[in-house]
Image (cartoon, grey):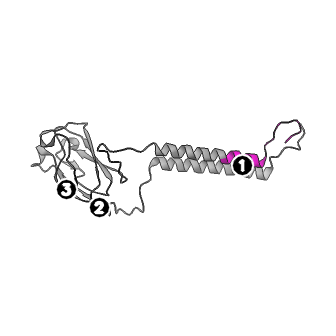
Amino acid sequence: MSTDGSESVTRRGFMRTATGAAAAAGAAGTASAQDETTEGEDGGGGGGGTEEVAVGPGGSLVFEPAELEIQPGTTVHWVWDSDNHNVQPSAQPEDADWSGTEGGDDQTYNTGHEYSYTFEVEGDYEYYCTPHRQAGMTGTITVSADAGGDGSAGPAIPSSAKTLGIATTAAMVFTLGLAYFFLKYGGDYAGVEE
């Protein structure tokens, strides 16, 4: 400290401030990443991610992809790309309660409609579009804990977590750089006369 009552920057004071700022930035980033979670329309939040199926892409009478292999807890999101389609199950495991789109076989939906369901029960699911079943518009979903064997070593990392990691690393590098500067060149100017 200087003799006139004003405080100078000390190494210890700098390190306390820098550590507090880095901790606050990390906590804010973590809270932001946690706010980005979503739930499926059928109440399932599932930890298995989301898969999208196009319904009648380009006016064709197919589901794309027609076959899916997913882990339990995965939400499948169907998006209509053409008119007069629905999603109705024809087979599913005994313990499952999937009922397909609302309205059963009698209700169809048009371009822009979206439907989601979170699959929790392992097994094979088969489904179809009522008006186009005879044309071959069918699909299958296999729910298995072993699904996703594409060589990935772990779960997918959401982009918010990647951003948080980059920001935290940058803050730490900045803090360490300033700490190095103060340690190398000093920072206690108590003896400096003005």
* Residue ID for mark 1: 15
Distance between the Cα atoms at labels 3 and 2? 13 Å
Secondary structure of residue under mark 1: helix
Q: Toward which corner of the image does residue 83 lie, by quadrant? A: top left
Give the camera-side residue of 121 and 149: 121
Secondary structure of residue under mark 2: loop
> Is 54 positioned to the left or the right of 61 in the image?
right
> Is 165 positioned to the left or the right of 74 in the image?
right
Q: Residue furthest left?
A: 134
* Residue ID for mark 2: 144
Distance between the Cα atoms at labels 3 and 1? 60 Å
Q: Which residue appears at 34% of the width and 63% of the height?
A: 149
Sequence-wise first label, 3 or 1: 1
Quick check: 150 above or below 45?
below
Q: Is residue 7 magenta?
A: yes
* Residue ID for mark 3: 92
Graded by Cα atoms within 10 Å as few (under 14), some (14 to 19) or many (20 or more), the crowding at tag 1 reads some
Sequence-wise first label, 3 or 2: 3
Q: Is residue 103 visible?
A: yes
Q: Is residue 138 visible?
A: no
Q: Residue furthest front?
A: 95
> Is 39 positioned to the left or the right of 121 in the image?
right
* Magenta-highlighted residues: 1-19
In the image, what residue type sits under mark 1?
Met
Measured as percent of width and height from the top left, residue 108 is found at 16, 39
Measured as percent of width and height from the top left, residue 194 is found at 89, 36
Measured as percent of width and height from the top left, residue 82 is found at 20, 39
